[in-house]
Image (spheres, rainbow, N blue to C red):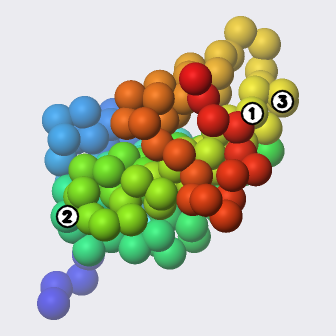
Amino acid sequence: MSELKSLSEEAIPAALEKAERYRLLNEPAEAESICLDILATDPQNQQALITLFLAVTDRFSKDYGVSDTQAGHLLARIQGDYERAYYNGILHERRAKAKLAQGHPGAAHYAYDNLCEAMRQFEMAERIRPPGNDDALLRWNTCARLIKKNRLVAREEDRSEPVLE
C-alpha cells in the first residue's frame, strides 16, 4: 500500500467543512476518511473527533460492520462533560434507531433500553448545558416520541422505568 499523504495544518478548516458536507450528503465513509487525515495532523482536534464520531454512528443503520467499540473510543476522546454526555446520548439513540430499523426479534426491548439510556445522558447534558443550548432537551424529546410512536416498553423484569403515556 502507498503511504498516506499528510494534511497541512492550514488545510484543516476547509477539510472540516468537507467532512461535514460529506456527512450531510449521507456519505459517512468519506467524512470518516477526511477526519482521520485531520486527526493524523492534529490528534486532539475536537471538531474532527465529533464529526468522526457522528460519521461512525451514521453508519449504524446502514448495515455496515461498524462496532460500538470504535464509537466508544472516539467518545472517550471528546473533551467536556456536556459534550461527552450529549454524544453518549446520540450513541444510544442511534443504536436504538438502527435496531428498530432491522426489526429483529428482541429489537423493541433493545431499542427501549438504549432510548432510556440516551434520555438519561441527555438529562445529564441538559443540567450542565451552556446557556441558550437546548440541543439535549430536543434530543430527549425525540427519544420520548420514538418510544411512544413505536409503543416500546421495558421487559417485564425491568418495569422500574416509567412508561411514557
- Relative to 144, is 85 on the left or the right? right
Which residue is under mark 3?
Answer: 128
Outermost bottom residue = 1
State the residue at coordinates (68%, 59%): 158
**At which x and y percent is residue 70?**
47, 71
Q: Which mark is residue 139?
A: none
Badge nearest the viewer, 2 or 3: 2
Q: Is residue 60 above or below residue 50?
A: below
Q: CA distance from mark 2 to mark 3?
A: 34 Å
For label 2, the crowd category at 10 Å Cα-Cα, with few meaning under 14, some 14 to 19 and many 20 or more, is few
Inspect this view and state whether residue 131 appears: yes
Mark 3 lies on a secondary structure that is: loop
Mark 2 vs 3, N-terminal side: 2
Give, as a three-letter code, the residue at label 2: Asp
- Dot 2: what SS? loop
Tell me the residue at 16%/85% (across/down). Answer: 2
* 11 or 49: nearer the viewer: 49
